[in-house]
Amino acid sequence: MKIENINKGKLYWLLQISGWSFLLTIRLLNAYNANNELTWESFIFFLLYFIIALFISHILRLIYKQYYNKMNTIIKLLIVLIVLSLFAAYIWYFFAFLLEAFEYRLKEGTFNFNSYYESYFKSKFYLNVFIYQPYFIMWSLAYFGIKRWFDYYSQKEKIERSNMLLKDAQFN
């Protein structure tokens, strides 16, 4: 099959959804092993958590598509990748904090946002952001790796097609 015949949009969404679903499954199994149970509330929380990650990574893709041709060196690419992954991790952590605060409110019945913010968000901010960042770094590396692979084979097919046309023109 020729690389140009592959529907890149469908492949992107297939890889995107299957990758985040795989990570969701691992996190659900870890949560179950830690507690020996998995409630519907926890499942919904994890599902929303990873839907947010899916959308954040999709936004990263849109940003990367805009600047892909401008990042002509590996150093530029790595700097952009690390900075945007850190920013994506911050956004993901912020939404996770809001989801956990909401979940806490549902379980406890009462909720003091300021004390929860002080004790949870601020105290664990840097630790959690740097824990979340590798997810987006790995996602970005996979995205660029697949994109470079497509570009390489697409260029290779064009060269082969040009060589065949050149040979045909020489014989005629």
Image (spheres, rainbow, N blue to C red):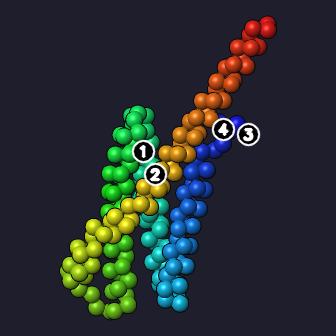
Can residue 58 be spotted in the picture? no
Amino acid type, mark 2: Ser
x and y, in percent, of residue 39 in the image: 51, 87
Write down the residue under mark 3. Answer: 1
Circles 2, 3 touching at the beta carbon (< 8 Å): no
**Helix, strand or loop at disc 4?**
helix
The image position of residue 29, as x and y in percent, is 55, 79
- Of labels 4 and 1, earlier in sequence is 4
56 is higher (above) or lower (below) than 124 = above
Report the residue marked by disc 1.
64
> What distance separates the C-alpha of mark 3 from that of mark 4?
6 Å
Q: Residue furthest front?
A: 75
Residue 86 drawn at (x, y percent): 33, 57
Report if the CB atoms under discs 3 and 4 are less than 8 Å apart. yes
- Do the CB atoms of the residues marked 1 and 2 lie less than 8 Å apart? yes
Image quadrant for the N terminus? Answer: top right
Q: Nearer the viewer, residue 144 or 7?
A: 144
Q: Nearer the viewer, mark 4 or mark 2?
A: 2
Q: Mark 2 sits on what residue?
A: 140
Q: Earlier in the sequence, mark 4 or mark 2?
A: 4
Work out how far the residue at label 1 is from the one at label 3, CA to CA, in angstroms: 27 Å
Tell which of 128 and 41 is nearer to you.
Answer: 128
Which residue has dot 4 on it? 3
Q: Earlier in the sequence, mark 1 or mark 2?
A: 1
Type of amino acid at the residue the image marks with label 4: Ile
Q: In the visual, does 142 lie left or right of 80?
A: right
Q: Residue at x 33, y 65 (%)?
A: 129
What's the CA distance linking mark 2 and mark 3? Answer: 26 Å
Q: Amino acid at mark 3?
A: Met
- Disc 4 versus disc 2: distance between alpha carbons? 21 Å
